[in-house]
Amino acid sequence: MIQSSVPSTNRSGIKAADVRPETDSVLLGMVLRERRVVGTLLGITAFLGLAGLMSLIAKLYLTDFFGRDLFIGLFDLNNESNVPAAFSALLLLLATLMLGVIAWARRQGARADALSWKALTFIFGFLALDEAAMLHERTADITRNVVKTDGILHYAWVLPYGVLALIVGLAFVRFLTQLPASIRNRVIVAGAIYVTGALGFELLEGAVVSDGGTQSLLNQSLVVAEEGMEMLGVILFIGALLSYIRMYLPGLQLRLSVAPVSPLTPRDSSGD
């Protein structure tokens, strides 16, 4: 059974009186403090970035040492199905969970923006699935059959995903303007960092690879920067969501509990 608690608010929108800075967010029985969560995630990102740089050095300059191939396989930011890729997918999954909770809470309060929060939940859920299953790579062949892609479009998936990113951005302009200024600015910064890493740096990598620099230091460095910016963007977005919950959904709680099941009463044999 899921027990929930949603703060009672009127339908006139967010007011300054709603802000309770000292309230922590409680999701699924876990108290989430913004600074602690963001700090921990940034620490993990820094570790993975350092490990990625070390794997880059090992791949380009160190021919052999004990565990070299295993280390590169685990932490190379240009590989999939390894530790950094799993962490990126988990970050997106965490953002999806938080968006879903906010969407649910706004719907319980009959707020007009509940549908926008729900749409964001599905978008980030797709991004998490895409990161885990590399769905964007599968669109490359389809795109190449329609449009000639070379140079900065070497990685053909950036074309359809870039168009989708533009459409989503335009569709959520009104939603962004309705957010509190402090939250809106943080969301915009987080989104700009993420899109710059995911699409902008991918375009630069495409140009370098088209010139034959697949294993060059420049291309590998761009990959490290790209992955780092993607992680940073999502972490900043998670921080903004935690701040939103803390300030404008005070008292929001979701807890999981299991209700005891009453034992079955034996059937009276006399009734047979």
Image: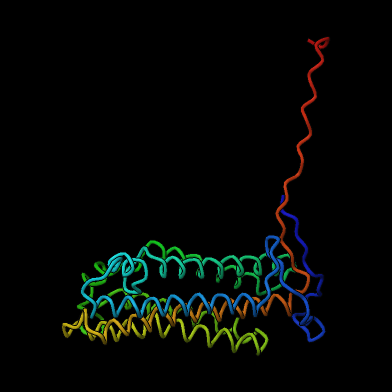
Residue nearest the viewer, comparing 40 with 34 = 40
Image label count:
0
Which one is in front, 10 or 96? Answer: 96
Residue 184 screen position, x and y as percent:
61, 86
Question: With respect to residue 17, does 70 lie above or below?
Answer: above
What colouring method underlies this structural image?
rainbow
Q: Quadrant of residue 81?
A: bottom left
Q: Residue at x 33, y 80 (%)?
A: 223
Residue 253, image x, y percentages: 74, 64
In the image, residue 115 sits, relative to residue 159, either above or below, namely: above
Q: Residue at x 62, y 80 (%)?
A: 240
- Looking at the image, which residue is at 73% across and 51% down? 257
Q: Position of residue 188 (x, y in %)?
A: 54, 86
- In the picture, measured across the screen, residue 19 lies left or right of residue 149, that is right
Name the residue furthest left.
212
- Quarter of the image for residue 149 reads bottom left
The reply, left or right, for residue 130 in relation to residue 2 is left
Residue 150, given in percent of the width and then of the height, sits at 20, 81
Residue lying furthest front: 66
The quarter of the picture where the C terminus appears is top right
Q: Nearer the viewer, residue 2 or 25?
A: 25
Q: Quadrant of residue 75?
A: bottom left
Q: Residue at x 71, y 67 (%)?
A: 26
* Residue 217 drawn above or below residue 58: below
